[in-house]
Image (tube, coloured by chain):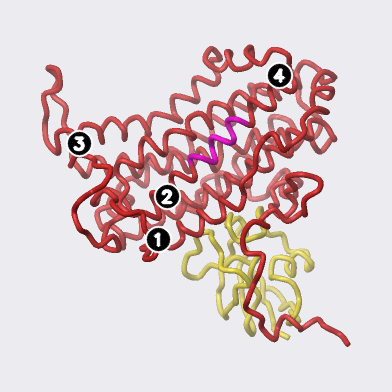
Chain colours: A red, B yellow
Amino acid sequence: MAYTTFNRNINDQLKEPMFFGNAVNVSRYDQQKYPIFEKLIEKQLSFFWRPEEIDVSKDRIDFQQLPDHEKHIFLSNLKYQTLLDSVQGRSPNVALLPIVSIPELETWIETWAFSETIHSRSYTHIVRNITAEPHKVFDDIMLNEKILERAQDVTRYYDALIDGVNLYQRCGEGNHNINGNIESITLRELKKRLYLCMMSVNVLEAIRFYVSFACSFAFAERELMEGNAKIIRLIARDEALHLTGTQHILNIMASGDDDPEMAEIARECEEDAYAIFMLAAEQEKDWAAYLFKDGSMIGLNKDILCQYVEYITNSRMQAVGLKPRFATTQNPIPWINTWLVSDNVQVAPQESEISSYLVGQIDNEVDSDEFGDFDL
Amino acid sequence: MSKVIVNAQMPLSYDSGQHNLLVFLEQHKQSVSFQCREGFCGACRCKLISGEVRYLQEPLAFVRKGEFLPCCSVPIGDISIEIPK
């Protein structure tokens, strides 16, 4: 079961499950078991952007004029996002590449993690521009208790999966004596860890990021920190796509068409899945309380942000086939939607407003419907 | 012209050549959550109770049987839909 970078077994990749089949050999996309991952890759590539393209020099002046409690909100969010993207820039690669079995999914994972590294670099870009002492911001991430508390739950499912896969690939199923400790692992246990890990990643991208997004956009609604908001908007667009990726993986797993055992595990882990969502929602509400401990900001306070967490948790749970658990049914901050619409994302002023210009500029299919609103 | 029934209310009339269903629903003051409006985030997911829709672009978001994304589709004939709470 050891991992190999080029598996010599001649296999039919169309018959492999997403994970825990044969390791991938030829990266070929002429035949695809799940074409959706290829489409996600294309979309992600069309979204490509670089932080340096966005001018954040005006943000420096804005930042200096912010009252202290708003500086706290702004910097704390940046720190938390830096933590989340530090994890996301490496973990999908480390945890999922050793066990993936189909090439289009393998490449999607790499493309996904790569785009997270752009996000990490963009935080440095922002911090460098708004403060003369960026090291103080980054050094605090490793010392800030509120952030570290979250780091624990963000990473534990990844770490459990990586640990189990290491043991399995080295020694196989069964009980093993590792340096005097008896450790046991089964493939079923690994599949369970994988399922819970995907669920936790889904929660990370679906809920955890959105509290910070809401604050960034609330500043920008007041025409403050607008360079930052432009960057966050691009990040939000990428995250929405990653989220679609994890939702597809989870739903394919739960359907059982790919690996019948995975469907059993999905049913078995339903309560754990609810618990992951509910714990994340509670932690994000605590985070909102920490952000606003010294005072609220115009347009946003702790209660509104907590309602938003509940609203978004409900909708994310439904997307992966779970029942909503909160009573909130209305979005308390509907203005956030206009910031999240991808059509309005503009990378640089000289470029067209539609940012998916890199692919699909020409549509060869012309239907008579297209002339429906033509008048002569 | 097709009829669009939303949450079992009075039918709304949709003219062919109009925008996608999300814009149509918004014009009729129906609140639908949305994010990307391009079919990749899935935020606007609604239930299709009866009838059929045609996608202007194939959605990337996960869509279950009996669901559809109004942001990138138009109705084919009369449809009945449910906007989730």
Q: Which residue is mark 1?
A: A29
Q: What distance separates the C-alpha of mark 2 from that of mark 1?
A: 10 Å
Report in which chain the residue with disc 4 lies.
A
Q: Is residue A211 magenta?
A: no
Amino acid of disc 4: His
Earlier in the chain: of badge 1 and badge 4, it is: 1
Q: Which residues are magenta?
A: A113-121
SS at mark 3 in the image:
helix
Question: Mark 1 and 4 residues: CB-CB less than 8 Å, in contact?
Answer: no
Earlier in the chain: of badge 4 and badge 3, it is: 4
Q: Position of residue A242 (x, y in %)?
A: 52, 47
- Front disc: 1 or 3: 1
Amino acid of disc 2: Thr
Earlier in the chain: of badge 1 and badge 3, it is: 1
Residue B48, placed above or below residue A36: below
Q: Quarter of the image holding residue A269? A: top left
Residue A107 numbered tag: 2
Quadrant where the C terminus of chain A is found in the figure: bottom right
Q: Which residue is mark 3?
A: A168
- Front disc: 1 or 4: 1
Q: Establish whether labels 1 and 3 are both on one chain.
A: yes
Q: Which residue is mark 4?
A: A72
Question: Mark 2 and 1 residues: CB-CB less than 8 Å, in contact?
Answer: yes
